[in-house]
Structure formats: structure tokens, C-alpha cells
Image: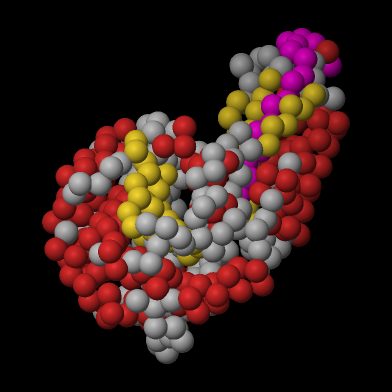
Amino acid sequence: MQQPQRPYPGYIERVVDRIRRADPPPMSSPFDGASTLHDRLADVVEGDGDALLQLSHDVHDHPELGFEEHQAVQAVANLLVDRGIEAEVGAYGLDTALRATTGTGEPAVAVIAEYDALPEIGHACGHNVICATAVGAFLALHELRDDLDGSVELIATPAEEGGGGKELIARAGGFDHIAAALMVHPFGMDVADHPWLGVRQVAVTYRGLPAHASMMPFLGRNALDAVVLAYTGVGQLRQHMLPSDRVHGIITDGGQAPNIVPERAAALFYLRSAEPETLTVLTEQVQAILESAAAATGTDADITWDPCPAYLPVRNNRPLAARYAVNVSDRARQVLPRGVAPETFAASTDMGNVSVRLPAIHPLLAIAPPEVTIHSPEFAEWAVSERADAATIDGAIGLARTAADYLADAELRSAVSDDFAAEGGVLDVLGLLS
């Protein structure tokens, strides 16, 4: 049997080589943060290492889809309870969300966990590592809670892979009192501030008239023709989209039988863009294409936007991202600044919806070689490798130190607020996407 054609490897090889030769200077931060606590936080995380890696591997070995992460959330809760920490499972009205708090008063910092998996390929996005790094950071901060000037929340969120758990938590008020939110995401390199695109989904169902495809096709109206025309129109749009835009789709229903003019056909598209405003423009363009396909074929179009919550682009807070980069620099990690890794290597996450409500970071954490793509079976294997285990400890230390820095340093907090305001401040997420 003929195998699929292998992609040309030269581009990725050149990109990887360019990144390795770039050798940018280490990132720096003008703030002291909670430097007196940094060594102690690292010691606590390393002391918890066995438990954190057991959690990471347990979540990896039992992949669960979005909103079905019952074993994962219970594993997190059990670890917290073992340390004397009250864990609220079913927080924010979501069965597989979790909330835990340590410290007292304001400001409050959130450390974000994820633990959902992908169909068939499991933890090919490394959410088991995200889960363990967040829990590790929270446990370390809990151990030093008497030395913190504020409080820390662990917010464990379901359904990042298409369900929008963080947006649902935000709508339930889960972030209303949070001053800053932190998490890391596994990747093939360490990057402090990498672009993550906003994404919307649009489902379209075309309805026509059935007829015998040979005897009386002129009495039918072909819904599949409408889908094909819409798919082709989206393809023709690609030449004129912004370089950072992406549109991709599938046909979910192509008709009933070849000798029946299809009465019903359907498709699902994802639209991605780097800015909220450009995502809105792309939305309008695709809406026009879907409507035009119906008009051209004499069919009716049922167009449904965002059957799951839309994801906005991530707005990484630069002062916080710099603190994170500094905080893992002693862990033999060279965290790249923005622009070294190609910005076309961009996906989407519901952390974007958090980042436009309050200051947030979403740095990349290297657990695999840079040529290994996320959402692949190979990346799923790397997610429980020795390299991923080391990254779990490093990421937990980086998050714990950065959270403590924010709570301890008023000048850092001021810079974080100024950067957030300069980038547009709080966005009306629901109004923007209506």
C-alpha cells in the first residue's frame, strides 16, 4: 500500500538550526521580586518531585476528554488533601473544575492547571505536565504561605481542547478577584512570550431539495454543492488573509447516497487570528462566503457561530514574562524572547480569554526537541520522558517564584498593571464576539 507523502523536512531543519545559532542574550528584569524566597521555593518543589511526577504520569496514563476529567481532578484533589489543603471539586458549576486557596488577603494570584486530553492521541499537548507544574507551584507557595503578602489560588480548568473551560469559569466570576494569572505550556523550546491566536468555530448546515440524481436532478437543490462551494470559497480567501490568519475546516455531512441529490450537508470551520479586531474581520469574511454559497445553489444555510466559547489571542504580560524567564534561568534553561521562534508556529488556547481580563502569562516550556510538533503521537510520548519530568520541576519552580515575586514587589505589580493597560486593558469578551 502506498504511504502518504512525507512533508519536506528542510524548512523545519533550517528553523531549528537558526534558533540554536541565535544565542540571544539572557532575558532580564529590573525587579527584585521575592528573591529571598526563591531558593526555599525551589527546595519545596524538588522535595515534592516524586509526588508531582507521579501526578503527571498518572494523568498521562489515563487520558480523559474535556469535561470528563474525573480521574485527573480527583488525583489533584487527593494530593492537596494529603497536604491538608481543602480542595473544591466541581467549582464554578463545572464538575471537573477545582479550586484551592492558600495565603490570605489581596492581591490574589492564580496558578492555572489543565488536564484534558485529545481523542485517540491522548496527552499529545502535554496537559499532564501543565497540571503537575501548576500543582507543584501551588504546593510550594502553600508551604511558604506565612511569608506571602497576599493569597494564591489553584484553578484547575477543564476542556481547554475545544470546550473553553476558562471562559466558562470567567463567566461564573472565577477570575473577578484575581490580580494576575500564571501557567506554562509544553512545547519544543522555552519561550517567554509566544503568540497564541484567537479562534472561533463556525458550523454550517445547508438544506436543499432531494431528487433522483439521474432521473430528475433538475427538481433538486444540492446541499453538498453548497458545502463544496463554501469550502472552495474559504480556500480562495486564504490568498488575501493576513499572514497570521488561519482557516481550516472539514465536511461533517456530505449527503445520504450518490443517487440522491443531497438534501442536507454540513461543514465545520475554525478561524484563527492574532488580534481580536482581525478575528472580527475574518469572521465577517467567512460569514459572507457561507451565505453566498447558499445563494448560489438555491439552498438554505443554518450558520452557527461558536458552539463552544471562542478563544481570544493571548496577551502575554511582558514584566511577568520577564520575571518567569529570570526565575528559570538557574535551571539550565535559556528562555527565548519573542521573535526568535517563528511566530507562524502558533496555536490557540482559552488562556487568551483570561489574559484580556487580567494580566497573565503563558510561556512555553521545552519538554521535547523543537522539531517535534504538539498534537502528535510523538509529542505524547515525550510528555512522560525524562526531559518532560525535568521540565515539570523547572516549570513549577518558575511559576512559584513568579507568583511570589508579584505578591512581594509593589513596583513589579505597578509595571504589570501599566503593561496591561497599554495593551488595551480589560476587554468585553462577550460583547466583542456577539
Quadrant of the image containing the N terminus: top left
**Percent x, y for residue 145?**
29, 62
Residue occupying image coordinates x 86% and y 31%? 295
Q: Is residue 419 left or right of residue 408?
A: right
Task: Choose between 13 and 416: the one closer to the eye.
Answer: 416
Q: Residue at x 60, y 68 (%)?
A: 420
| Whether residue 65 can be seen here | no
Question: Residue 308 placed where, x, y %?
Answer: 57, 37
Q: Position of residue 204 (x, y in %)?
A: 69, 31
Q: Is 394 placed left or right of 231 in the picture?
A: left
Mark count: 0
Residue 297 position by quadrant: top right
Instruction: Judge by depth and name the residue closer to the eye, 62 or 220.
Output: 62
Please report the bounds of the magenta region as a residue range: 199-218
Quick one: 158 or 298, which is closer to the camera? 158
- The correct choice, above or below, for 295 with respect to 341 in the image is above
Where does the image place residue 67, in percent across and percent down from the top left?
42, 33
Q: Is residue 322 left or right of residue 343?
A: left
**In the figure, residue 95 lies in which quadrant?**
top left
Residue lying farthest to the bottom in this orientation: 25
Of 420 and 101, nearer the camera is: 101
Compared to residue 23, the image places residue 150 above or below, namely above
Q: What colour-coding does the image apply?
A: secondary structure
Instruction: Let me know if residue 217 is in the magenta part.
Output: yes
> Could you tell me which quadrant the C terminus lies in?
top right
Residue 398 on the magenta segment: no
Tell me the residue at 39%/33% (across/down): 90
Residue 39 appearing in the image: yes
Residue at image coords 21%, 72%:
40
